[in-house]
Image: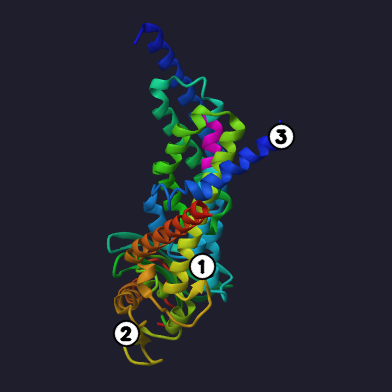
Amino acid sequence: MTGKDIIKITLNLVVIYIAGGIILTAIYAWTSPIMYRNDVIEKEQALKELMPEAETIEKLGDWTVHDKHAEYFIGKRGDMVTGYIVQSFGKGYSSYINTLIAVDKDFIVQRINILGHAETPGLGDEIEMDSFTNRFSGKDREHLQVVKTETTDYIQAISGATISSRAVTEDAVKQGVDFLIKRIREGKDGEPAEHE
Amino acid sequence: MVSPQNTNRYLDLIKNGIFTENTIFKLALSLCPSIAVTNNLRNGVLMGMAVLFVQVMVNITVSLLRHFIHPRIRLPVFMLIISGWVTVTDMTMAAFFREAYKEMGLYIQLIVAFASILARAEMFASKNKVTPSLFDGVGMGLGFLFALSVISFFREILGKGSLWGFPIIDAKPLLIMILPAGGFFAVGILMGFFNWIEMRYAKKHRSS
């Protein structure tokens, strides 16, 4: 390799890598605000879908579950509290299941939404289907229990996916509801439950 | 420039990519994504389209720069071009095709390491003009798309009884097909099937 080659190779690499860097920076500058905006919109929509009766949904604070950071919110209509939304995680068969849970002001579960998971496709991933999440509406914390037989009083497990069903019900949702009851009843956030 | 002869050559390049040198069934390259993302048709098709796009863009860029790139450093430069286009695809998909990106995001970034794309840049685009490189990219990309679609079609219908997420039959005839192990079965059986067809085809041609 001659000296000329070395210079040419260096120049080659410098030019190409700088050009690549500039192009990527430009695209990033263009797309990242859009991504950020989409994130915010999506989160707001997810919260709204969980609590359509609320006019405003405000963040109350943060908490940790399974060493993961999660948030909780309060939904209001005028001055009236319509309920709370809490994010929670459950340890599933092959992943932590990221869940949003909406409860009314008596801490009865209204709706839940599975935000993310990596459970077995075809078995565990049925936890995100409406047919499963609908089983949660109207359950208080005592009825958040997985049963393998046919039932509407408790949560009926998905056949072939008991571990994932349990993780959602007895881990994610129950912990979330327990946390809300404790935190809100204690009134730590300046939002005392008014029916006490 | 577009003479009948040229058109024929381009058609041959596309056919070559889809059948004669099909990335998965013939070259047995990039088998990882062909197992990882093919448990439903939608993922398979989207992944195939992303690869098609990246392959074409990489081929064009490499072909345009082929006189400028010093042969000794061609591989790092190809890698930069590939990862550059993959990142561009990744970011634009994240911004504009959010729903698809949620499922595909992880795999899009994997395209960087696809042997098939580097192989085409090295074997074809760096030695040919832009137009044939473009058609080679289209052919290879379509071949990949075709392979992924076929694999994911069978895996989803057999494993989940649905297609593109819509239930077709109310049963799961062969659940194992959507699990990772089923991916190996599907790829192996289809690879054998396509090779068998080719052998029969070749035999017929010889005897007639």
**Which disc number belongs to residue A83?**
none
Three-letter amino acid code of the residue under disc 1: Leu
- The part of the image, by quadrant, that contains residue A135 is bottom left
Q: Position of residue A131 (x, y in %)?
A: 47, 81
Taking the spot 46% from the left edge, 26% from the top edge, the residue there is A17
Q: Nearer the viewer, residue A129 or B155?
A: B155
Q: Which segment is the magenta one?
A: B55-62
Q: CA distance from mark 3 to mark 2?
A: 70 Å
**Which disc number belongs to residue A47?**
1
Taking the spot 37% from the left edge, 74% from the top edge, the residue there is B175
Q: Position of residue A42 (x, y in %)?
A: 54, 60
Residue B59 on the magenta segment: yes
* Viewer-side label of 2, 1: 2
Q: Nearer the viewer, residue B19 or A109?
A: B19
Look at mark 2 in the image and give the residue it sits on.
A145
Q: Secondary structure at mark 1?
A: helix
Q: Secondary structure at mark 2?
A: loop
* Viewer-side label of 3, 2: 3
